[in-house]
Image (cartoon, helix red, strand yellow):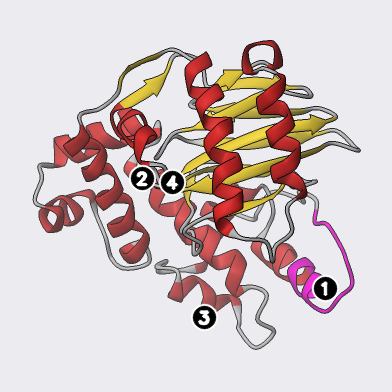
């Protein structure tokens, strides 16, 4: 599955690690995960890592990442926040990239691990300032333990954020790399290079990932037909939509829609890949 752009509503989020895998995605914020118990595998910028208790992973802004497998009984926390949340670390997040996005427990230290436990146990109704204080200590240890190299120039990282916002907003329209480059005020070659270097995916694949993600959301609505859905998602015909949907999810759209509506109705059902679509 290609990376999709996740538009986050919260400015600052701290929550328990999901029990289920989460697909490859990018967002403009920083994401830090620390495992407290159990084990999980994550992919960051094209490489896969296994996290065990006390290990931490950090995804810098606009870095593709996913949670691939999570062992039963695994517990940990995920913090997602803007790069400027803690001023003293913002320059690193804006201009640098880690040589290794994973810091092991022996490098991170027991104080940071203790703070991670405290952060995970904070209640939703507790002060955001308390959570930020715990996060401040964790980041101090995490960033001190790592090594970094210069990332894209600040203005190029800013352009990357502007590009993904534009693509997310216009993906379901009649958009091409030429029209997007024109609206963004850059050359086609520059835009193509940006996708290859920052997102490790081509322009069209990124568009399709956003469109199919929207389609899966619309499929939960019991009053929408597949024709209405593919039209709203920017496809001209069912054949093209079906091919893109299967390529992205491995499942026929009609089968996915039936399963999604069962889930929405409260009858849990996890769809499995079915037969190949008819030509």
Residue pictured at 65% horizontal, 88% vertical: 223
Q: Nearer the viewer, mark 1 or mark 3?
A: 1
Residue pictured at 53% horizontal, 40% vertical: 31
> Residue 263 lies in magenta, yes or no?
yes
Residue pictured at 67% horizontal, 17% vertical: 109
| Label 2 sits on residue | 84
**Which one is earlier in the sequence, the residue at label 2 or at label 3?**
2
Please state which of residues 114 and 258 is positioned toward the viewer in this rendering: 114
Please state which of residues 141 and 228 is positioned toward the viewer in this rendering: 141
Task: Residue 156: give x, y in percent of width and height.
Answer: 20, 36
| Label 1 sits on residue | 262
What range of the chain is rendered magenta?
A: 259-271
**Which one is earlier in the sequence, the residue at label 1 or at label 3?**
3
| Label 4 sits on residue | 29
Question: Which quarter of the picture shows residue 97?
Answer: top left
Task: Residue 256: give x, y in percent of width and height.
Answer: 71, 63
**Which one is earlier in the sequence, the residue at label 4 or at label 1?**
4
As displayed, is residue 135 above or below residue 150? below
Tag 2, which secondary structure? loop
Tag 1, which secondary structure? helix
Image quadrant holding the C terminus, namely bottom right
């Amino acid at each position: 599955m290609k990376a999709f752009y996740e538009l986050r509503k919260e400015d600052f989020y701290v929550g328990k690690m999901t029990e289920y895998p989460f697909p490859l995605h990018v967002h403009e914020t920083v994401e830090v995960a620390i495992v407290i118990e159990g084990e999980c595998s994550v992919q960051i910028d094209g490489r896969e890592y296994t996290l065990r208790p006390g290990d931490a992973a950090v995804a810098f802004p606009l870095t593709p990442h996913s949670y691939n497998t999570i062992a039963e009984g695994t517990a940990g926390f995920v913090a997602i926040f803007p790069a400027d949340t803690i001023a003293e670390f913002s320059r690193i997040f804006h201009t640098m990239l880690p040589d290794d996005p994973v810091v092991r427990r022996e490098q991170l230290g027991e104080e940071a691990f203790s703070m991670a436990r405290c952060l995970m146990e904070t209640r939703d109704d507790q002060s955001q300032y308390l959570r930020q204080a715990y996060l401040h200590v964790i980041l101090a240890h995490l960033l001190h333990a790592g090594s970094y190299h210069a990332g894209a120039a600040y203005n190029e990282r800013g352009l990357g954020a502007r590009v993904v916002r534009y693509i997310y907003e216009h993906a379901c329209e009649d958009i091409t790399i030429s029209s997007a480059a024109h609206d963004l005020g850059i050359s086609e070659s520059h835009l193509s290079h940006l996708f290859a270097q920052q997102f490790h995916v081509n322009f069209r694949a990124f568009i399709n990932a956003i469109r199919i993600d929207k389609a899966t959301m619309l499929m939960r609505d019991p009053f929408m037909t597949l024709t209405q859905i593919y039209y709203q998602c920017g496809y001209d015909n069912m054949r093209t939509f079906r091919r893109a949907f299967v390529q992205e999810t491995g499942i026929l759209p009609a089968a996915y829609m039936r399963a999604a509506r069962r889930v929405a109705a409260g009858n849990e059902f996890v769809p499995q890949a079915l037969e190949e679509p008819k030509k």
